[in-house]
Image (cartoon, helix red, strand yellow):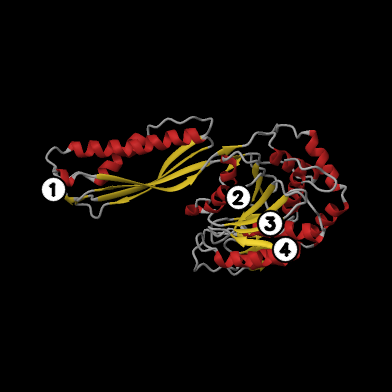
Amino acid sequence: MTNHPPILEQYTNTIAALLKNNQVEKALGCIQDQTELAMQEQVDLCEISAPTFQEEKRADELVKRMKQYGLTDVCKDGIGNVLGRRKGKTGAKTIAIGAHMDSVFPAETDVKVRREGNVYWAPGIGDNCSGLRALLQVLRALNEANIETDEDILFVGTVGEEGNGDIRGSKFLCANTKLDAFIAVDSTDVGRVLRGAVGSHRWRIAVDGPGGHSFAEFGKTPSAIHTVCRAGAEIAKIEVPEDPKTTFTIGTIKGGTTVNTIAAHCEVDVDIRSTDNTELKKVEDAVLAAFEKAVKEENARWPNALPETHLKVTTTQIGNRPAGLRPHDCPVLQSARAAQKALGIELTNYGLSSTDANAAMSLNIPSTCLCSGGKGIGAHTLKEHFVFEKTELGPKLILLTSLALAGTSDTKPLL
């Protein structure tokens, strides 16, 4: 999309008023002047290993730094998220800013950061230690400038955003904390404002039976692999809409033991995605039905097979990220776009992705995902690196967006 919907006047006016506020000017100056300090913070956090499901040490460091920067109400919630509340004058509403703490790399990965000029090399240095850096920059700037907001701002380090973590941290947050707006901080491209969340359902589907010798037991024992092949053929025929974009794939398949064996076990991992929860469910139902049908057909294929040799299917959900789409006049989207424009940032990606914002968007909470600034390259690889340039733009964008929503002495909250 190149012809973006208009930014409404009230948001442009609010951002303009914020930029004239001396305290806001001081906060923006703090972000600008402390880029080196912030980059060191990004390095420090990166060098604390934090695989998904093992974020405790990094979480402890985040708690320490939030308290160091003036938050008194800091805790871990029931799933391990770090929460730090900066209370407003009224506190009638809560704007959450969240960055995920986990990385995709196993605990034994070397996460020592190597610097070459303005390039920093380490697994996880960009995704998402840059987001944590921006989160802390915003907090530090608000406190050093002594800005009082009308509404509460909740600073959050989430667990389990990556892979099989299945955004469990943000889902728990949205289910257990009253939120009126949510800004996820992930990736580095400040030209991106996400208006929607791509939902995904993932299933591990296993077919099991006794198996047997390929010659001696032929006709007496159904095959787990043949069953999966039958199901795969059915799944390949599923029709999906182009809009809302909906996709499916059998991502992995494994089973069998030797070439001369009727397979006793075969399993697949299936990924289904859509920007619409209804379409997501339709395809999910079709995929699961294909396996049920395939088992019945394979068992019926061999009339001499005894009931105890019949195959059974087991389905296990291994991923459930809900979809969501925000209207163009959503106050979070409008505030972010107005802030972008004021900072001279071009909106280059007004699209959809799968982030911590999924949970909030699926519940119709005004939300988006903004980026940290700088330039992350090679995310999710051992060659990941981060270019230290224009890192101030991310936290400046997040700061202005948050203040527009939360209200200040000179502006009314836009929520």
On the question of residue 49 being in view, the answer is no
Upstream in sequence: badge 4 or badge 3: 4
Type of amino acid at the residue the image marks with label 3 = Arg
Pick the quarter of the image with the C terminus. Answer: top right
Crowdedness near tag 1: few (<14), some (14–19) or many (≥20) residues, C-alpha within 10 Å: some
- Give the numbered dot on residue 381: none
Crowdedness near tag 4: few (<14), some (14–19) or many (≥20) residues, C-alpha within 10 Å: many
The residue identified by callout 4 is 38
Crowdedness near tag 3: few (<14), some (14–19) or many (≥20) residues, C-alpha within 10 Å: some
The residue identified by callout 3 is 85
Secondary element at tag 1: loop
Type of amino acid at the residue the image marks with label 2 = Thr
Disc 4 to disc 1, how far (Cα)? 67 Å
Q: Which of 210 and 74 is in front in this view?
A: 74
Give the quarter of the image for residue 362: top right
Q: Pointer 2 and pointer 4: residues touching (CB < 8 Å)?
A: no
Query: Which mark lies nearer to you, 2 or 4?
Result: 2
- Give the numbered dot on residue 217: 1
Type of amino acid at the residue the image marks with label 4 = Ala
| Residue at image coords 34%, 39% | 232
Disc 2 to disc 1, how far (Cα)? 58 Å
Position of 367 with respect to 90 (left or right) is left
Position of 237 with respect to 356 (left or right) is left
- Give the numbered dot on residue 177: 2
Query: Which mark lies nearer to you, 4 or 1?
Result: 4
Q: Pointer 4 and pointer 3: residues touching (CB < 8 Å)?
A: no
Disc 4 to disc 3, how far (Cα)? 21 Å
Q: How far from the left and from the top, in percent, is residue 360?
A: 59, 44
Upstream in sequence: badge 2 or badge 1: 2
Disc 1 to disc 3, how far (Cα)? 66 Å
